[in-house]
Amino acid sequence: MIVKLSGGTVYDPTNGVNGKRRDIYIKDGRIINKPDIQAKIGKTYDLRGKVIMSGAIDIHTHIGGGKVNLARMMLPEDHRDDTVKRTSITRAGCGHAVPSTLTAGYRYAEMGYTSCFEPAMLPANARQTHMEMADTPIVDKGAYALLGNDDFFLQMLAAKKDQAAINDYVAWIIQSSQALGIKVVNPGGINAFKFNQRKLDLDDKNPFYNVSPREILISLSRAVHELGIPHPLHVHGCNLGVPGNKHSTLDTIEGVEGLPMHLTHIQFHSYGNEGDRKFSSGAAEIAESVNKHKNISIDVGQILFGQTVTASGDTMHQYEGHWHAHPKKWLLMDIECDAGCGVVPFRYEDKNFVNALQWAIGLELFLQVDDPWRIFLTTDHPNGAPFTTYPHLIRLLMDRGFRNDMLSTINKAAASSSILASLDREYSLYEIAIMTRAAPARSLGLKDRGHLGSGAAADITVYTEHRNKERMFAKPDYVFKDGELVAEKGKVVHVTSGGTHTLRPDYNTGIEKSLVKYFERYVNIKLGNFKLADDEITDLGKGKLIIQPCVR
Amino acid sequence: MKGMIFTLSFKPRFALDLSPLIPERMQSMTQAEIKRIQLDYGKGKLAVEKAFKIKSAKNNNIEFRRSTDKLIRIGRNMSKGTIIIKGDVGDYVGQSMKGGTIIVNGNAGSLMGCAMSEGYIQVNGNVGDYLGGALAGEIEGMSDGFICIYGNAGNCIGDRMRRGMIVIEGSAGNYCGSRMHAGTIIVLDRAGEHVGFSMRRGTIVLAKRPRHIAATFRSCGNLKMQFLRLLFKQIANMGKQYDIFKKIDPEVHRYAGDLAYKGKGEILILQPILESIKPGTKSA
């Protein structure tokens, strides 16, 4: 059956379509060119005056894996006070900051999102992560495997193994944990924390392995590049949340030697230490540097005020943050010495100087980075704010009047120390379409997502244009996932299960010989059980694997 | 005492959630509005008028008559006024209560006064488990207020309790004062096994030596604790029903513990003088 979306205004940056009236035809879950006159149109949606974009893609959202589950267990109040009743098609759920898997999937679909990527999957915990993602309905999923703090990799680096061996290990991790990319969290720092170090700058040495974060970053980003993994190394840099950390972020950008790199939730890494309170914005310098270095892409990790929970692999800085926990409880965990995990509930207050300035810094970054193809819209869900606040964030970016109104309500000292009021830029719908659709798809190497050209997967969102962009983006009129109508007027109408994007890089399987020995000696499970087979994702009938090609 | 009188007019088969029926909420409502309040009943809903016969007089008092153990969450989040319950009552009485008084003339279920932060609860009967405990998954239980039970209490009373006082005139079950953060529990009859299991701070006063005290509690010998004299005097001044406290001597055998949890808590065992006092003597 062919479905026709008739007369809508299309924003499709990948194909350079900026607000033109186009008809879109869907057949078998794919977008097709205009069919012959004879072809029978099964159903037509009259979308005159509506805005059509492809389904949105969240490149960095913690929706699965150990730490999210720990956060769920630790926060009964988050669930008690936000319950969702079951309907005839959707199941019951709960949770504001860390919703249950099912609720997360429904809410994403209701907002017009069709793909979400879990950025911090510990290879040792990949099975749990994929099970949770399989449980997240409708949206497509994928995950980045955490490396850079695990013993095996650091041993290799300390022993000065050649790059080919490191490439093999990285590829083996991707394969065995069914990942779509590689992320490094506080390179070497989580490991150094276990040796009682509380700070690790870019050129400090890990006390045990004698390896610096700079070496880890270069080695990993080279591996990612040489293996042809489409998404550049996903970096959560050193010194998260430390005043004055802009210097190490700038050094990181310089230090990667022109290799492609993605700096995630950069808002938390853009702080200066000037002013009376030794806390200031470094957004201008960071934005300038990002504008200059075309190999760098970023996502912001905007904070928005209210109760949330921070769940991060960065044990070192979650430990620092635990003094500010609200409500007063927190945890740090480790699994197989792979990396780390820290969960600290947090409440961002608009009258608090530091929180208010964090809010302004995130927006300053959005408005000062020129190229929307290299900056993605995230709140680092749930660390900056739950993903349900995206429409509000879009309004802040698109509506200068609203932004300045909000600015006048926050902490006065923070508002006056920020240059936000002087930034006139307003994002256009086209730019929003780039940063939430086209750019993430391109960065992740998803050729058939994030655009509306012929052959693309029919992940489509239809909005009603409204002056209040928060209203416009909160409840899209129609959301199609692989050609099926899944949500209408902001309510789920049909529940499907999305696929899992993963990669199959080429590598020398000889690496398993040394890994087998290592597993026998140090790891609690056998190598064979560590690897996540394809069947484990597809067997329950809830998921399918979508293998993305490596670019070489 | 005149107030709104709710007489249960049927025999509930499922749990009937009465949390909307609290004094401060009903004050601003007309009787017709009150009758239309929808209560959670099992999986469905039930209007107040279908469940109760109502006699109304405007003040802050509520009385539930012919109550059964299927009525739950009475007085949830209440902050003022008085609720009197005639008959047995189910779980979660006075959950998250912030003030006011609840009096139960009958037996009550589990999790009574859980997470309460102020107020007074009195039960002229027995209660179930987790008296003054915490909501599921929470770190802290009752954070202030006063609970007095004339009968016996179940297991884990004062679980994760943070502040406030629980007085049991009868006996207590196992794990009395388990995981206590602070506060005071007084038991005038025998307590079961594992008293003060993983308590951090706080005081458990027992009138009778329990059969079993965990190895993680260390004896500190017999002491005369002057604070107990003040405490008992204060309680005795609260009303005639607490006259029994006038007879108690503050000389105790002190155990410090739980040493597995820093050992800042204590179990105080009163001198055997009190053994002659009959447990559960109801003087009110």
Image (cartoon, rainbow, N blue to C red):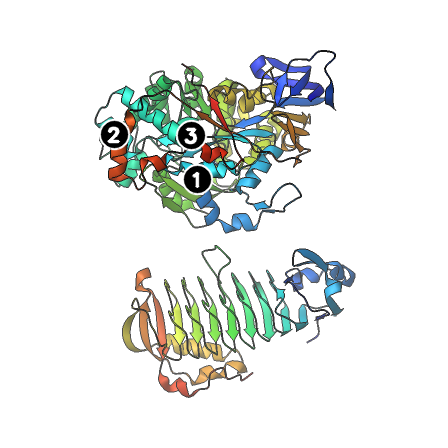
Q: Quadrant of residue B185?
A: bottom left
The alpha-carbon separation of the residues under discs 2 and 3 comes to 21 Å
Q: Position of residue B269 (x, y in %)?
A: 36, 77
Up/down of A196 relative to A44, above or below: below
Q: Chain of mark 3?
A: A
Where residue A188 is drawn, which disc sits there?
none
Badge number at residue A128: 1
Q: Residue at x 49, y 22 (%)?
A: A375
Residue type at mark 1 is: Gln
Label 1: few (<14), some or many (≥20) within 10 Å?
A: some
Sequence-first tag of 2 and 1: 1
Q: Are marks 1 and 3 in contact (CB under 8 Å)?
A: no
Left or right: residue A449 compared with residue A74 = right
How packed mark 3 is, by other alpha carbons closer than 10 Å (few <14, some 14-19, many 20 or more), is many
Residue A34, position as x, y percentages in the image? 68, 13
Front in this rendered view, residue A347 or A354 = A347
Q: Which residue is mark 2?
A: A514
How far apart marks 2 and 1 lie (CA) works out to 26 Å
Depth order, front residue of A118/A326: A118
Q: Is residue A219 in view?
A: no
Q: Provide residue A22's location: percent of width, then percent of height.
A: 68, 15
Q: Earlier in the sequence, mark 2 or mark 3?
A: 3
Q: CA distance from mark 1 to mark 3?
A: 12 Å
Q: Residue at x 34, y 35 (%)?
A: A528
Can residue A532 be seen by looking at this rendering? yes
The label on residue A178 is: 3
Above or below for B271 versus A215: below
Image quarter in which the N terminus of chain A is found: top right
Q: Nearer the viewer, residue A219 or A392?
A: A219
Q: Amino acid at mark 2?
A: Ser
